[in-house]
Image (cartoon, rainbow, N blue to C red):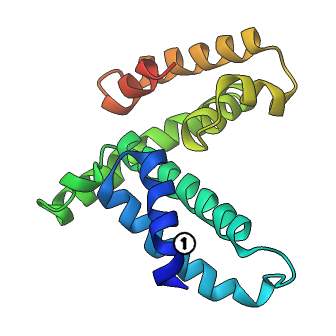
Amino acid sequence: MFKEYSPFVFRTAYFLTRSTSVADDITQETFIKIMKSIHKYDSSKPIEPWIYKITINTTRNILRKQKWLRFVGVIPEAAQENMVEKSILQTEKEKELMQEINKLSQKLKEVIILHFYLGLKLKEVADVLDIPVGTCKSRLNAGLVKLRNHIPEHEHIKMMEGGI
């Protein structure tokens, strides 16, 4: 199965990520998931759509994780140097940022979490919260302003502001 479908999985992952190393990771993770859930596959249907769906979901999850890693300042390719030191420092920064996010009102916190931590687009956030996109943008901006006022030098807030 791997020999037959891995080129397809890799190609799909590569087109979605434009990274050979990430596509390799996605291919490996996809086949791990396939092997774990092969008993759920309905053999009366073609297998390609099932594999495609697992590939897409795995790609989304890995991209979300990478987005999160970049958001907290760990770039996967550069993460090898001084890993322990950076990890401890990063954990402290993440903790500080999350503490400040948790101090925000529920409305502001929801928009920030959905947009930056879960990777939803502002339109999707607005749909989830059942609010207009303008209100969503306003809440996001208000949340970022409050975060900036409490921890102005925090690089993650600057990254958030750049992503609006």
Q: Nearer the viewer, residue 22 or 92?
A: 22
> Can you say whether 18 is above or below 39 in the image?
above
Give the x, y percent position of residue 7. Answer: 45, 68
Identify the residue at image location x=37%, y=58%. Answer: 22
Residue 149, x across and y down, in percent: 43, 17
Residue 45 location (% of width, % of height): 84, 75
Above or below residue 116? Residue 135 is above
Q: Residue furthest left?
A: 81
Image check: 65 left or right of 133?
Answer: left
Q: Residues within 10 Å of mark 1 (few under 14, many from 20)?
A: many
Please say whether residue 68 is visible from this viewpoint: no
Q: Secondary structure at mark 1?
A: helix
Q: Residue at x 66, y 14 (%)?
A: 137
Residue in view at x 37 percent, y 45 percent: 18
Corner quadrant of residue 109: top right
Q: Looking at the picture, how far across and down is residue 43, in whole percent?
A: 82, 85
Screen quadrant of the N terminus = bottom right
Q: Is residue 74 above or below residue 115?
A: below
Residue type beneath disc 1: Thr
Q: Residue furthest bottom?
A: 39
Query: In this figure, which residue is indicated by the disc labeled 1?
Result: 30
**Number of numbered labels in the structure image:** 1
Q: Is residue 127 above or below residue 51?
A: above
Q: Residue at x 84, y 19 (%)?
A: 131
Residue 120: quadrant of the picture: top right
Q: Is residue 152 visible?
A: yes
